[in-house]
Amino acid sequence: MKKTFIDAICQSIAANLKLLPCIITIGFFSLGASANPRLASKQQIGMFKNSTLCVVLENGTITYNILIKEAVEKYWKSTDFVFISQEEFNQRHFDSKYSFLVLMKGVFDNDPDGVSYNYLSLVLGDKSTDLTNMPELCSFPVSYCDDNTMDFGYVIPAMVKFMQKHALNLESHRFMISLRGLKYYNGSSSFKDKVLLLNKDMMALDADSPEKIKSTYPYYVKFLNGDEIEKEIASDPSNALFNFHVGPAQEDAAGKCFEMIFDVYGNLYYYNSRKITNENKDGFNLKDFRRL
């Protein structure tokens, strides 16, 4: 028997209802965001300067809330700010007089495995009912969605500082940033006379010791774990750089890995992402060092 028009409509509604559990999640505030969000226009960048930043706190995620509150209270200087709940975000996100610092869940459009990542995003309020259309100023991946270890605590202050500098750069360099994304900053600063703090647990096999990278990267490095890096940068050393890595919790997991290098002042020295394969495994590798 042929399907009737009413049957087709009912099946479509049922299929959409099945998607709801993927959108409504517990823990990280998941907006179902595209990994290719709409970059704020020049006019919207100007609106951001006059906005009030709403820092969205997570329901039931105390560690993240402590981290983001401390970083914003210490380092956010660009605009007024307030801390709000996810419920308040649902009421305010239509209003362009507000900007938002919020954790978002994104899926790369070209990721065949549909792997999801948590992003720390700076976005502007927008009238669109589609949250993924909120104009973006900056987004950083901070973890895979299935990784609840909160190992990104030490990089949050640098990201908060960087986002403010990035918003200023967007005013005069929006076109080039729209073409290159955060890779726009690659090669803009020198690594000479800096000590690079590398997370030894996040290095690829071809770059997991000073001896292996010496011929490719001749400057001073220190291999540390995440806790040791956090202690090193706590005193704001002026000559220190540190890497931050986002990769899968399981060694054989699919998806992408992300590599970032910051200084303690919130300058971004390096950004890259790549697909993880059997031949090109997870971790900061020699190819990354060659790009420095």
Image: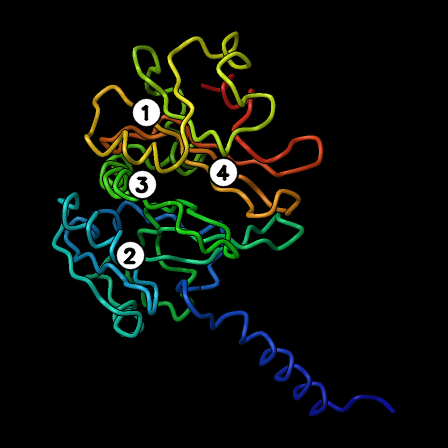
Query: Is residue 88 placed above or below 111 in the rendered structure?
Result: below
Label 2 and label 4: CA atoms lie apart by: 25 Å
**Residue in view at x 47 percent, y 29 percent:** 200
Label 2 and label 3: CA atoms lie apart by: 25 Å
Label 1 and label 3: CA atoms lie apart by: 13 Å
Mark toward the start of the polypeptide (1 vs 3): 3
Q: What is the x, y in percent for residue 28?
A: 41, 62
Mark toward the start of the polypeptide (3 vs 4): 3
Q: What residue is disc 1 on?
A: 241
For label 3, the SS is helix
Mark toward the start of the polypeptide (1 vs 2): 2
Mark toward the start of the polypeptide (2 vs 4): 2
Q: Closer to the observer: label 1 or label 2?
A: 1
Viewer-nearest residue: 226 or 218: 226
Viewer-nearest residue: 113 or 249: 249
Query: Callout 1: few (<14), some (14-19), or many (20+) C-alpha neighbours within 10 Å?
Result: many
**Residue that protrudes farthest toward the right in the picture:** 1
Q: Is residue 292 left or right of residue 44?
A: right
Q: What residue is disc 2 on?
A: 124
Q: Residue 258 has which mark?
A: 4
Q: What residue is disc 3 on?
A: 154
Query: Is residue 153 placed above or below 21 in the rendered structure?
Result: above
Q: Which quadrant of the structure image shows residue 267?
A: top left
**Residue in view at x 61 percent, y 78 percent:** 18
Query: Callout 3: few (<14), some (14-19), or many (20+) C-alpha neighbours within 10 Å?
Result: many
Q: Closer to the observer: label 1 or label 4?
A: 1
Label 3 and label 4: CA atoms lie apart by: 16 Å
- The reply to whether callout 1 and callout 4 are in contact (CB within 8 Å) is no
Amino acid carrying mark 2 in the image: Leu
Query: Callout 4: few (<14), some (14-19), or many (20+) C-alpha neighbours within 10 Å?
Result: many
